[in-house]
Amino acid sequence: MAQILEFVTNHLMLVSAFCAVLMALLWALLRDLGSNAISPQQGIMLLNREGAVPVDIRNAASFRAGHIINALNFELTELNVSPSKLDKHKAQPLLLYCDTGVSSQKAVKHLTRAGFSRVHQLRGGLSAWRSENLPLEVSK
């Protein structure tokens, strides 16, 4: 025990940096455990095995430029005002996504409060989907 205390005393900066990194990792882990964020690969399984409905919350121009196949397009502001537009899909899992995953996290919380029970967010958004070279549909 005395050796540990001596090490900590002699290497205070190193121990402080180690503790900071450890706390950051724990915070990130706990944040992901409490969220409904799923990876692109998990998203594919949700779409294929459970018939999830992909919901793109980006603007219409971004949607037309490329989106997940069979996705619905409801902008974030539209979902905030009237989440009932998705009522017919309440029994199905929903996979919400935006460009990076930040806005879709807000939409997941909003829809969960509105009574949707199976709402998931695509971690990293469409950027993560593209980086995995997964298929996109382009509207004309």
Image (cartoon, helix red, strand yellow):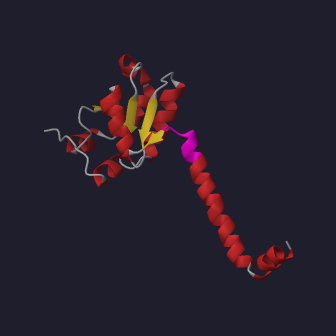
Q: Position of residue 92 (x, y in %)?
A: 38, 22
Residue drawn at (39%, 40%) of the image = 42
Residue drawn at (23%, 36%) of the image = 69
- Quadrant that contains the N terminus: bottom right
Residue drawn at (58%, 40%) of the image = 34
Magenta region: which residues? 31-36
Left or right relative to 59: residue 100: right
Using the rendered image of the protein, determine whether residue 114 is visible from the camera's viewpoint.
yes
- Quadrant that contains the C terminus: top left
Q: Nearer the viewer, residue 10 or 76?
A: 10
- Quadrant of residue 88 within the rendered picture: top left
Q: Which of 57 and 67 is in front in this view?
A: 67
In this figure, what is the number of numbered marks?
A: 0
Q: Where is residue 72 in the image (x, y as percent from the top left)?
A: 29, 30
Using the rendered image of the protein, determine whether residue 73 is visible from the camera's viewpoint.
no
Considering only vertical position in the picture, is 53 above or below 97?
above
Q: Position of residue 68 (x, y in %)?
A: 27, 39
28 within the magenta span: no
Q: Magenta-highlighted stretch: main secondary structure?
A: helix
